[in-house]
Amino acid sequence: MSIDRRFIVDIFEDIVNEVRLEFDPTNEKTPYYMYGHPIDVTRQLEFKENMTSKLEKFPLIYLLLDLPKNADNNLLYQYKVSPTIFVLAQTDPSFTSTERTDVTFKPILYPITDLLIQKINESQHLIGKTYGVEYTWTDKYFWGKEGIRIKGYEGLIFNDYLDGIELNLKDLQIIKSDECF
């Protein structure tokens, strides 16, 4: 697929497709990818709930929008972004933290997040630091269904019981063209 470098959502879709192929070689379409405002993603997930199986919603890699872009007329890159990405998996609301670690985090969330960071670092469309993308990683236990807060958005965002990982990426540069290398 040809990537239009102006759109970070397309770049991340390509990256998630690479994660999917490595995480799920049987190509059963996991993890899934969505982007948008939290309310919009909730609506998309509700639509999927009504149209498909719950198994076709999660695990999910979710790119949070609104996303400020910084530009400075650099010849190498189009703009810089510092996106927030959530890696989410369904969980049982009765699980303890220990059970969530063993059932959700270790076998699903950690491997997907590790692959995501690896694929971001390998992307030909992005430049991070010379040693790789800089980020903060936060485990989010007991994160869905009960009220949550995402960058100023407060309240019931997702209608599923979720555990997740929040990645705050720092200063990714979006490459202008393949000729830059």
Image (cartoon, rainbow, N blue to C red):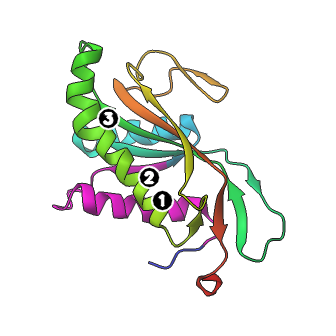
- Contact between marks 2 and 1 (CB within 8 A): the answer is yes
Q: CA distance from mark 1 to mark 3?
A: 20 Å
Element under disc 1:
helix
Mark number, residue 163: none
Amino acid type for the residue under numbered disc 1: Ile
Specify the farthest residue to the left. Answer: 26
Q: Looking at this view, is 70 or 44 the one in front?
A: 70
Pointer 2 local density, CA inside 10 Å: few below 14, some 14–19, many at least 20: some
Residue under circle 3? 89
Q: Looking at this view, is 121 or 177 the one in front?
A: 121
Pointer 1 local density, CA inside 10 Å: few below 14, some 14–19, many at least 20: many
Q: CA distance from mark 2 to mark 3?
A: 17 Å
Q: Looking at this view, is 97 or 51 the one in front?
A: 97
| Quarter of the image where the C terminus is located | bottom right
Q: Is residue 151 above or below residue 95?
A: below
Pointer 3 local density, CA inside 10 Å: few below 14, some 14–19, many at least 20: many
65 part of magenta stretch? no
Q: Position of residue 80 (x, y in %)?
A: 70, 58
Observer able to see residue 90: yes
Taking the spot 70% from the left edge, 71% from the top edge, the residue there is 77
Taking the spot 35% from the left edge, 27% from the top edge, the residue there is 162
Amino acid type for the residue under numbered disc 3: Ala
Residue under circle 2? 117
Q: Is residue 11 above or below residue 156?
A: below
Taking the spot 39% from the left edge, 41% from the top edge, the residue there is 47
Amino acid type for the residue under numbered disc 2: Ile
Taking the spot 55% from the left edge, 34% from the top edge, the residue there is 39
Magenta segment boundaries in residue numbering? 5-34
Residue under circle 1? 120
| Quarter of the image where the N terminus is located | bottom left
Q: Is residue 20 left or right of residue 80?
A: left
